[in-house]
Image: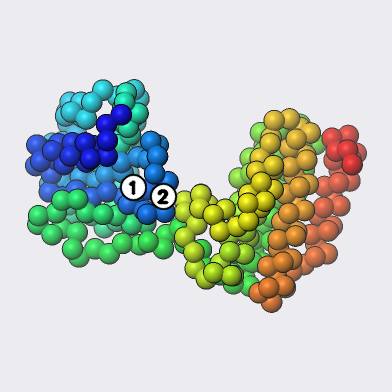
Amino acid sequence: MRTESEMLNLILQIAKNLQVEAVAMSGSRTNPKGPKDEFQDYDVVYIVDDLDNLTSALSWLDSFSKRIIEQHNVLGNRRLYLMLFEDGNRIDLTLCPKDHIQEWVDSEADYTVLKDEKGLFESYTTSPGRYWTSPASGIDFKKACNEFWWVSAYVAKGICRKQLLYATDHLYGICQQELLKVLAWQVASDRGTVDIGKNYKYLFQYLPTEKEKEFSVLLDFSSKEKITQSLFATMQLFHQEAQSLAHKMGFDYDKEVAEKMIQYAEERLETNETFTK
């Protein structure tokens, strides 16, 4: 695998060959909290004067080396080339017209300029707070609780109908995301605004080890029985964390609704013989 130094030199050399106006890098390689391992991508942007000319023939991408797989995407006025190379390195390369730098800047939490002889980035500011979580407001907390308990009924319905993809999608995609939100608010209530990262990837760095283990157990969706167990464990953990946060922050928490929704799910799943106490 090529080293970081070799990759950065290559990125800048190809930019020079293409007469790119400016080069910047974002993502985990510019974040001191990011894990330093072989899976770190090179999230790079080339600021270009003539996008059509560069995209009309893409043979220059071969200069990065042979690719195992790639994707080409259109993002607004930008073009994105995702490339995984045979040596294991990966580059997510964006071509951005110089008249649309703001569009790229707005899509990133932070970035480091690698080349900018004309000062094209000087008038732009980063948005490092993109994945930061601040202490919850009472309204946000109420909405999160309502969303969690409302959607929990969809999960129960999916299990009862043996629609396991439907149930899992609502359980992980909505209910457990609301649980993660409450856990992030727990951290923010103690520490103030914190960087939890994209998809909560840094969240458990702020929490006790047992909390991550407790959440990880919820992620077994391998059978109808496991999904059912996950639903009830998720409900109990959300109920526990929501009460704790409400007490800490002085929020109203409708404990009666929570307990009725747990009972609602129990009654229906027991009737359908999918839940065993």
- Residue type pointed to by label 2: Gly
- Residue type pointed to by label 1: Arg
Sequence-wise, the earlier of marks 1 and 2 is 1
Q: Quadrant of residue 242?
A: bottom right
Look at mark 2 in the image and give the residue it sits on. Answer: 34
Q: Estimate how packed mark 1 is, as few (under 14), some (14 to 19) or many (20 or more) residues with alpha carbons within 10 Å.
A: some
Q: For the point 63% across and 72% down, which residue is it?
A: 138
Secondary structure beneath dot 2 equals loop
Is label 1 in contact with label 2 (beta carbons under 8 Å)? yes
Q: Position of residue 230 (x, y in %)?
A: 74, 42
Residue 91 visible in this rendered orientation of the protein: yes
Q: Observer-nearest residue: 203 or 136?
A: 203
Q: Quadrant of the C terminus?
A: top right
Q: For the point 22% across and 30% down, which residue is it?
A: 64
Q: Observer-nearest residue: 186 or 77?
A: 186
Q: Is residue 80 above or below residue 143?
A: above
Q: Position of residue 66 (x, y in %)?
A: 26, 22
Alpha carbon separation for disc pair 1 and 2: 7 Å
Instruction: Determine whether, in the image, residue 119 is placed left or right of residue 124.
Output: left
Secondary structure beneath dot 1 equals helix
Look at mark 1 in the image and give the residue it sits on. Answer: 29
Q: For the point 56% across and 67% down, which residue is it?
A: 188
Q: Position of residue 204 (x, y in %)?
A: 57, 53
Q: For the point 47% across and 51% down, which residue is it?
A: 198
Residue 70 visible in this rendered orientation of the protein: no
